[in-house]
Image (spheres, rainbow, N blue to C red):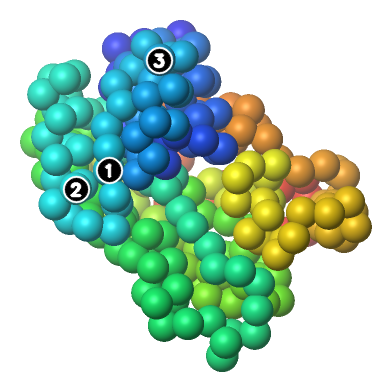
Amino acid sequence: MRLEGKSAIITGGGSGFGAGIARKFTAEGARVMIADINIESARKVASEVDGIAQFTDVAFTGSVKEMAEAAIKAFGKVDILINNAGITHKPQPMEEVTEHDFDRVFAVNAKSVYHTAVHLVPHMKAKGGGAILNMASTAGLSPRPLLNWYNASKGWMITATKAMAVELAPAGVRVNAICPVAGDTPLLKSFMGEDTPEMRAKFLATIPIGRFSTPEDIGNAAVFLCSDEAAMITGAALEVDGGRCI
């Protein structure tokens, strides 16, 4: 029960890594809000973990403000924020990615972190502390060809994590990131372009441990980084990647 008494918001919590984090957090004693643009998926996960579902489009500040206010009203406080919501563009040469797709990737993967900071960092400062966990990627450390602007958005996430950590440390707010390798989640097909045995084998050949990451892997890492066991860890970008970035 490493998170007993804690309350958390998990963006993109309706599927994939976010759902894995929600299940692990609940098992460790936390109360969770599942914030997702797909409200049906959010409700499904929330019902499994006795949590709260909240429709949220993290690309828009008004939606994030409603999320923050709803969580504070429901829980009385927010101790942990998981910036997990993310999207990608289909694999293609950088000059062929449309401006619309570029803007959407950066709105969801990068600007969303600004929105959640605006609406939740003051609350964490006022209550004397908190933990923020940003979902980055091995793509931000060792970019894959043809995922150019997605790679860049995750590199931004790693730098933002370190900048947030050094600024918020005096306020008692720790900020870390997780860098997962590709996982068997709804985004996998988008990363690969097509989900075939051949493409999976090609991806797996780049991971020394020989398998994709799982929501459970990410949930385990998230619990540690957001728990008091990691009280001296801030500004870290933890690779949960089966050795891919070695």
Q: Which residue is mark 2?
A: 63
Q: Are marks 3 and 1 in contact (CB under 8 Å)?
A: no
Could you say which disc has been placed on residue 56 in the image? 1
Residue 30 visible in rendering = no
The secondary structure type at the circle numbered 1 is loop
Q: Specify the amino acid type for callout 1.
A: Thr
Label 2, label 3: how far apart the Cα atoms are:
22 Å
* 143 or 13: nearer the viewer: 13
The secondary structure type at the circle numbered 3 is helix
194 with respect to 96 (left or right): right
Residue at image position (39%, 20%) is: 46
Badge 2 or badge 3: first in the primary sequence: 3
Instruction: State which quadrant residue 244 falls in.
Output: bottom right
How crowded is the residue under tag 1: few (<14 C-alpha within 10 Å), some, or many (20+)? Answer: many
Instruction: State which quadrant residue 16 falls in.
Output: top right
Label 3, label 1: how far apart the Cα atoms are:
17 Å
For the C terminus, the quadrant is bottom right
Residue at image position (17%, 55%) is: 61
126 with respect to 200 (left or right): left
Q: Are marks 1 and 2 in contact (CB under 8 Å)?
A: yes
Residue 105 visible in rendering = yes
Where is residue 67? Give x, y as percent.
Answer: 20, 38
Q: Specify the amino acid type for callout 3.
A: Ser
* 104 or 246: nearer the viewer: 104
Could you say which disc has been placed on residue 47 in the image? 3
Where is residue 107? Give x, y as percent.
Answer: 34, 65
The secondary structure type at the circle numbered 2 is helix
Label 1, label 2: how far apart the Cα atoms are:
5 Å
How crowded is the residue under tag 2: few (<14 C-alpha within 10 Å), some, or many (20+)? Answer: some
User: Taking 119 as reference, is 77 above or below it?
Assistant: above
How many marks do you count on the picture?
3
